Image (spheres, rainbow, N blue to C red):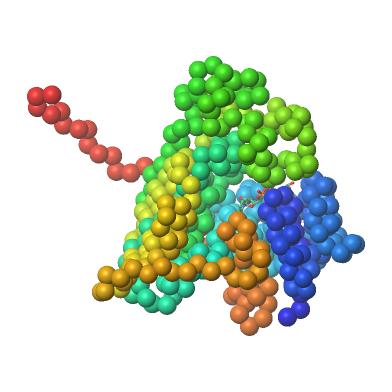
Amino acid sequence: MKPLQIAILGCGSRGRTYSRIACSLEGRYQITAAADLVEVRTSAVAELAPEGSVRTFRSAEDLFAAGKLADVLVIATQDADHFGHAVTALKSGYDLLLEKPAAESLARCEELDALARSLGRRIALGFVLRYTPFYRAVKAVVDSGRLGKIITLRASEGVEPYHQAHSYVRGHWSKTGSSTPMIVAKCSHDTDLLCWLSGSAPRSVSSFGRLEWFRAQNAPAGAPPRCTDGCPAAADCAYDAHRYLTDKRGWLRMVMDHSETAEDSQILDFLKSSPWGRCVYRCDNDAVDHQVLSAELENGVTATLSMTAFDLGRTIEIHGTLGSLRGGSPFQTAGAPELWLREHRTDTWETIPVVAPEAAGYAGHGGGDFGLVDALDAMFQGPNAMPPGLDGLDGHRLAFLAEASRIQGGVPLPAPVPMKNG
Ligand SMILES: NC(=O)c1ccc[n+]([C@@H]2O[C@H](COP(=O)([O-])OP(=O)(O)OC[C@H]3O[C@@H](n4cnc5c(N)ncnc54)[C@H](O)[C@@H]3O)[C@@H](O)[C@H]2O)c1
């Protein structure tokens, strides 16, 4: 196969990650163009490739005005920009690697799918979990038939409290109106996995959830609006922004240019004025910190997902007529295998190996970022290329409909009948 030419729109955290991996896979990818509103970010991408080989642009509009510059456009701008950028890109002749979520509403996701089909173009979403060694192993067991007919799926996602605070309280996805709801922004990975693993579209869904903890009434006494204003509760606060100077410094890379080489004083200045220095109980966030969904899929499978800020890692359980598969990092942390299978007939348990492919890049971040880029050229060219359309629409449908159900609320229970004698 000839190298796949890719252009990068949005050279922030995701755009740079994909670019770095593509450049590490010598001979398979060629980055031809990079666009971002912030010049140092396009320069960072250009520096990864041979000198002079990447055309840089200061906006999406400038990039599109230059005509079609690659086979595939990677769109890694923020959620609310995806739809507009994707429509223009499809009409400009690009296939797309579009960061999830595809758009900020289900109607727009469906519109993208219809447009891509009508133009004969492919849209892959940034569903990196599908490409991790762990979920590849899960999918291989499901596809092998060893579980029999799949009946029940149970998934959980623990965001982790500081991660929740960084991204969904202080950060880019804290306000649903300017990004997307939590069940879409974070859990569209999980709703995609439920549909992808069961091989089915959703039929019906209900969901509950709310913002419980990261609210003003839970602020410690005397906590100021910013951690940098000298909070009396800082010593005991798990969310103190000063942790960005020490053990949480890695998170800054995603939101502060040059954070890797910044002096502590520069980081403190950043925290004094940026959203990431704010008290987590005094932000303008509305993203939920816990949510559950239960769904029935077209093929009769029932699926549940529980997301909480107050756990770490994902689990998956798949129960079929012949066997049960169970796994995830929290099980492994607790001393169980990462993935194991029970065969019902014999009551035997077997550890399923989770093997990372030889390539070194699979080691980091669960391997999904590397796995996705490693799979990308075959998704867009050659005999096994994806069909036209938006791959992953079913999972997005499940996530957006879950949010609609959450907002609508469930069937209220009747008022409790007072008990006799008390
Ligand atoms: N697949 C995953 O696991 C995963 C993980 C994190 C984030 N995301 C998604 O990836 C996307 C990007 O997230 P991020 O963390 O990289 O955000 P980011 O803010 O770091 O990067 C976005 C970049 O787009 C640039 N940009 C915005 N408007 C532009 C325009 N009109 N023209 C050119 N550049 C423009 C910004 O300057 C910024 O550098 C988001 O939609 C996010 O939800 C996906």
Query: Quick check: 97 above or below 335?
Result: below
Query: Quick check: 375 above or below 399?
Result: below
Q: Determine the residue located farthest toward the left in the rendered image.
A: 421
Left or right: where 169 falls relative to 305: right
**Residue at position x 65%, y 69% from top?**
359
Left or right: where 158 falls relative to 76: left
Q: Determine the residue located farthest toward the front in the rendered image.
A: 335
Rendering coords of residue 196 (x, y %):
47, 66
Q: Nearer the viewer, residue 300 or 327?
A: 327
Left or right: where 141 falls relative to 162: left
Asked whether residue 185 is in view, the answer is yes
Q: The C terminus appears in which quarter of the rendering?
A: top left
Rendering coords of residue 116 (x, y %):
62, 67
Picture quarter containing residue 264? top right
Q: Nearer the viewer, residue 185 or 326?
A: 326
Rendering coords of residue 380 (x, y %):
66, 73
**Residue at position x 78%, y 34% from top?**
263
Q: The N terminus appears in which quarter of the rendering?
A: bottom right
**Residue at position x 25%, y 74% from top?**
345
Count of labels in the image: 0
Left or right: where 308 falls relative to 110: left
Asked whether residue 65 is in view, the answer is no
Query: Quick check: 218 above or below 67?
Result: above
Q: Determine the residue located farthest toward the top in the rendered image.
A: 222
**Residue at position x 49%, y 29% from top?**
215
Rendering coords of residue 232 (x, y %):
57, 18
Q: Determine the residue located farthest toward the bottom in the rendered image.
A: 383
Picture quarter containing residue 27? bottom right
